[in-house]
Amino acid sequence: MKYYIDIKLLGDTEITLGFIWQKVYSEVHLALVRQKDNDEMIGLGLSLPNYNQSFPLGDTIRLFAQTKEELTALKIEERLKKFVDYLNIESIKEVPNDIKTYVTFSRKRFKSNAEIRRLAKRYAKRNNISEEEALAEYTLTEEKYTKLKEKNKLPFINIKSTSTNQFLKVFIEKKEMDKEEIGKFNTFGLSKTSTVPWF
């Protein structure tokens, strides 16, 4: 990734940072959706430079691209003009040459109770056992309990689905990587394998 643009969110006493995050990130997501290829992927990656600081996601959305043109094509200023009082969009800049750390920001999904029950029911049918026995296979083992605790620690963004009108929580996990991995991102700007520079 060679270029980036920062969107700085400005919360105040009347409007919380979480509310601004929800509105702004929804618009960023829609802008990214318009850039998707035939595989539903994009060449732009998202970074959260203040991840897990005072507000879990920080106050800055950083978008990376290989070219200035990709960032310009987002028309991010136009998309976010209704939030002009609550954010500051900086100009497109070149990524510094001395980057030594790369990270991934990925969406982490967790199974809900309803999902666990559905899986247990299917497991029971496949293995010819009772649903109670199958459910015992999916109860809170130490590993699953640890994952649930981890879920409570991961920051998330509430996004309103344009297709169902329901809110969904997008849990975001950051991982440091040994080296840069160039690749594609989903329409949230996230990937488990493609990295973005960390600075």
Image: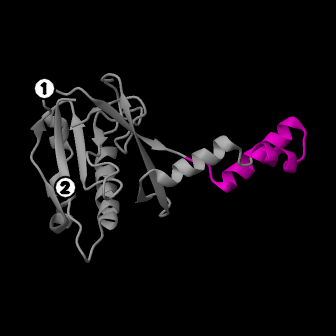
Residue 81, by quadrant, is bottom left
Query: Which residue is more in the foreground, 136 or 31?
Result: 136
Q: In the rendered image of this protein, does residue 174 appear above or below residue 9?
A: above
On screen, residue 80 versus residue 48, left or right, reads left
Residue highlighted by disc 1: 97
Can you say whether 134 is above or below 161 in the image? above
Q: Which of marks 2 and 1 is nearer the N terminus?
A: 2
Q: Check disc 2 and give the amino acid type.
A: Lys
- Secondary structure at badge 1 equals loop
Q: Locate residue 37: give its quadrant.
A: top left
Residue stretch rendered in magenta on the structure: 110-138
The residue located at (19%, 55%) in the rendering is 8
- Percent of width and height locating residue 42: 33, 35
Check residue 25 for magenta coloring: no
Q: Which class describes the residues within 10 Å of circle 1: few (<14), some (14-19), or many (20+)? A: few
Residue for badge 2: 8
Q: Residue 3: which quarter of the image?
A: top left
Q: What mark, if any, has residue 5 been given in the picture? A: none
Quadrant where the N terminus is found in the figure:
top left
Label 2: few (<14), some (14–19) or many (≥20) C-alpha neighbours in 10 Å:
some
Q: Does the magenta stretch include residue 135?
A: yes
